[in-house]
Image (spheres, helix red, strand yellow):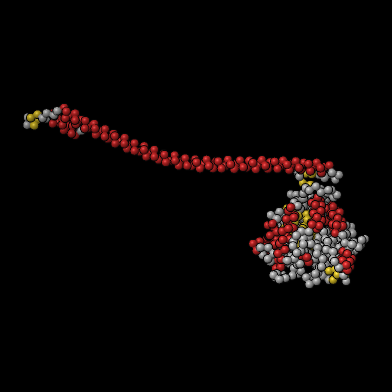
Amino acid sequence: SVALMFALFLYSTSFGGLTIQVSEETVQSIENQKHNAEVKDEILKELVEVQKEVQDTKDEIKNLAKTKEQMKETVEVIEDEIKNLAETKEEIEESVDEIESEIKTLAETKEQLQKSDDSVVVEKKIIEENDFSGQEYDGKRRTRVTTKDGLFYINGKLTYHDAALENMRGALISNRMVNTIFDFDEPEDPEEAAAYHKYFGYPDTGKWDAERNTREFIGNMSSYAEHGLNGITLGLQGGGPFFYQVVTPSGLAKYCTPENPAPWNNSAFWLETGVLREEYMNRMERVLNEADRLGMIVILQVFYQSQMWKMPNDIIKVALKNSMDWVMEKGYTNVIIEVANEYNHQNFKDRPGRVNKKFGKFWHGVVPDDFGKGIAGVVNYTRAITNKKFPVGVSLTSRLLPDEDIAAVSDVIFFHAVRARKDDFEELIKTLYNTYVGRKPIIINEDNSFGGKWGNRLLMSAKYGIGWGPIFDCKARNVNDYKTGFQCLPINYSIKSTGRKRNYFNGVKNLVSPVLEEALSDIEKVEEEEPNDPDEENV
């Protein structure tokens, strides 16, 4: 613009009278230059805008590419989810089919049971009644035991849930009857065989009969249930059948020890191989089936000291595995496993490769160390091979509590109180209660006194909500009387055969009664008969 003004100035100005003439072409040229400059400025501006738009477009393309990748990943996730949903749908459809099938089976079972002579009531798929005696077993399990917060449940309900004494709700009251499948291998020596039958045999026949023993036990089980007993201890290797004595052709020898062994082999598995013996397991199956029908819990004791110490180290684990596989294959749900009776008993003696020290060092090396040391490892191994389907524990000799490593892996705490006097027993019960209440359910499944000068153990235990279980064995003078106890052979399984038995079962019946007056009526009665000598070796 300055150039233009100057040109115009020159155009119209005279110098010394001279007039400078500027051509129109020059002016036009100047004006064109101005226009071109303006156009250039506009083009530069537009170019800058275009460059900005190009950059924006590049950024947008980059963002779109990223979005595309994200969408691709999202699509893959959605496709995986659709696949999972399809699989879940198939699983749900299969579950629905199984449930429908189960409902149909339960409906058929309910109809069959309602038609039965015993008029068994089915409620919410749980059979509450305990009177199944005489019925043919139909293969369906009716009784399931579980534990929670230190209490026992049967089919999802607290045991004795309607008991007037609230302390009894969730307790397990048992009786030790470990010789219900007892038998022995007939000795080849005629004199020895005659001695066995003399002391094992029934008074009316003079012969031992394993089938009769099991049959008579099953025939009396309903009376136990009717009196409120909800647990029984059975044994795959039995228990001391002669007040802990050994039978010989010349008579009874004092006590079974590794140095003075029980010559009979009473074991549901072969001691040399751990293979189960069919005739024993057939008898056990019939007993477990009846217990299942009656709504009773079975404490299944696997090992017993006077038999187990004869077994090679590597066979113990085989026998344990075979036994647990059998229980699982049969589908039992009313079983608690007691791995061994009094695992620290003196009869678990040292042998080559074993260390004999207190508290069961015998058990070291029975299972891999991965499961733990000693008996704690054996208990843990048992829980592992049964997929924790059964509560598992182990008992000690009288008046001893398990070490913490054993208690930690045990689902239940077994306690034996034989030889504990009244004051000692009360202190032991308090200790049990204070140590395990709310943590682990407690089972007293061996004691040799009901009342008398030793105090009413049934009632003392009930005060703390702990179920009590006696061992009705016999004294030496009662051997072979077919009357006393539930362990010395031959066994009279009737609850009416002695006053001691009657008192115990009547006490249980009243203790768990839903009627308070009955619960308090005569449970404090003491027995007339003296208990066994507490100084005798417990079994």
Residue 189, position in %: x, y?
86, 68
In the foreground, 430 or 201: 201
Q: How far from the left and from the top, in percent, is residue 192?
A: 86, 68
Corner quadrant of residue 97 = top right
The image quarter in which residue 398 lies: bottom right
Q: Between residues 130 and 110, which one lies in front from this camera angle?
A: 110
Position of the N terminus, as image quadrant, is top left
Please tell me which residue is depicted at 78% across the width and 72% down the height of the picture.
259
Q: Quadrant of the C terminus?
A: bottom right
Q: How many marks?
A: 0
| Residue 354 place in picture, x, y as percent | 70, 69
Residue in front for this viewpoint, 2 or 51 = 51
What residue appears at the point 85 percent right and 45 percent down from the top-left corner?
Answer: 118
93 over 423 or under it: above or below: above
268 sits to left or right of 23: right
Picture layout, residue 234 above or below residue 88: below
Residue 351 at least partly seen? yes
Q: Residue pushed farthest bottom? A: 259
- x, y percent for residue 146: 73, 53
Q: Quadrant of residue 448?
A: bottom right
- Most extreme residue toward the front is 188
- Hey, which residue is sitting farthest right in the picture? 204
Residue with the most extreme top position: 24
Q: At 70% from the left edge and 61% from the top edge, which residue is drawn? A: 379
Q: Is residue 85 above or below residue 332?
A: above
Residue visible at 79% across and 50% down in the picture: 162
* Residue 472 appears in view: no
